[in-house]
Image (cartoon, rainbow, N blue to C red):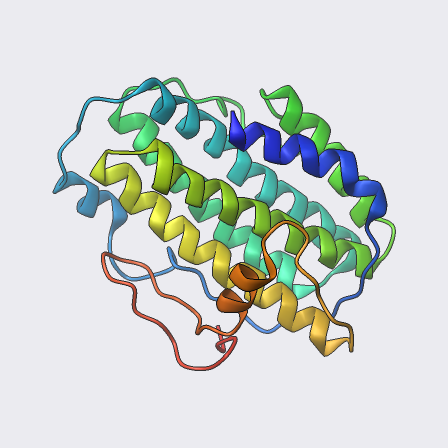
Amino acid sequence: MKLQSNYIYFLLILSSFTFASCSSPTESDALNQSYDLDKTLETMAIEELSPAEEEGLLFLREEEKLARDVYITLYEKWELTVFNNISKSEQKHTDAIKLLLDRYELDDPMMEDVIGIFKNEDLQNLYNSLVEKGNESIEEALKVGGAIEEIDILDLELQINEKVDNEDIKFVYSNLLRGSKNHIRAFVRNIENYGFTYEPQYMTPEAYQIIIESDMERGGRGKGKRRGRHGNG
């Protein structure tokens, strides 16, 4: 599956990471809005679930947990606000996937939510490698954050554009995608505040630049945006 191959590829090139970083203003998140996601989903039909949609939901549940767990762990190491803020957003992301698992009566791979423990072996190995890399320096830690968000964006776009037909799943994934775009903007802002330049590690330069030059995004059924290059969060 492409989702898994992205992360395995990421694992193979972690050893090439070097970078820099900074402190953090408050981060904005597309799911951190006043609307009630659960009530919105109740207005949508529960459609037949394809094998690809089921596989994607189960993987993304733990993928979002991985982002949360890495950020919590790196915050404990470096005490950078960006990791604390975005870990809370990632909690909302994995909670949103759980709503879909419940709607479609799928077993939750996160039956026991323990930081750093994963049912998926590839994600378990990736978590271990990310934390090891992020513990080397603040610079490496922030680059790990940027890479995670790039991969999240690519995986969500793959699901939305190629794997998912169900309206409710697309709705949630689209909100997660806007959140991940906000997160990478926040990491890049922090890196730039330290005086370094971030280069995309997985996305094309063109796709990356479009995100970075766009405003912070809000969630919901629309695609409202906050003013400003990186937003104020």
Quadrant for residue 7, please give it.
Answer: top right
Q: Residue furthest bottom?
A: 228
Q: Which of 18/63 is in front?
A: 18
Q: Which residue lies furthest to the right in this view?
A: 136
| Residue 138 x/y as whole percent | 81, 60
Q: Can residue 27 be seen in this view?
A: no
Which percent across, then down, holds residue 104? 26, 23
Query: Residue visible at 55% across and 63% down?
Result: 206
Foreground pick, 198 / 77: 198
Q: Nearer the viewer, residue 155 or 131?
A: 155
Q: Does residue 133 appear left or right of residue 113 in this picture?
A: right
**Residue found 49% across the figure and 40% down from its top:** 155
**Would residue 183 be visible to someone looking at this image?**
yes
Q: Judge from the rendering whether residue 191 lies leftward or rightward of residue 206; answer left or right.
A: right
Query: Horizontally, is 82 left or right of 178 in the view?
Result: right
Q: Residue at x 57, y 28 (%)?
A: 4
List x then y, in percent, for residue 145: 66, 53
Residue 61 location (% of width, % of height): 46, 32
Residue 116 vertical placement versus 160 (above, below): above
**Is residue 203 toward the left or the right of residue 134 in the image?**
left
Q: Give the answer, above or below, for where 69 lies relative to 180.
A: above
Q: Residue 187's quadrant in the figure? A: bottom right
Residue 40 sits above or below residue 210 on the image: above
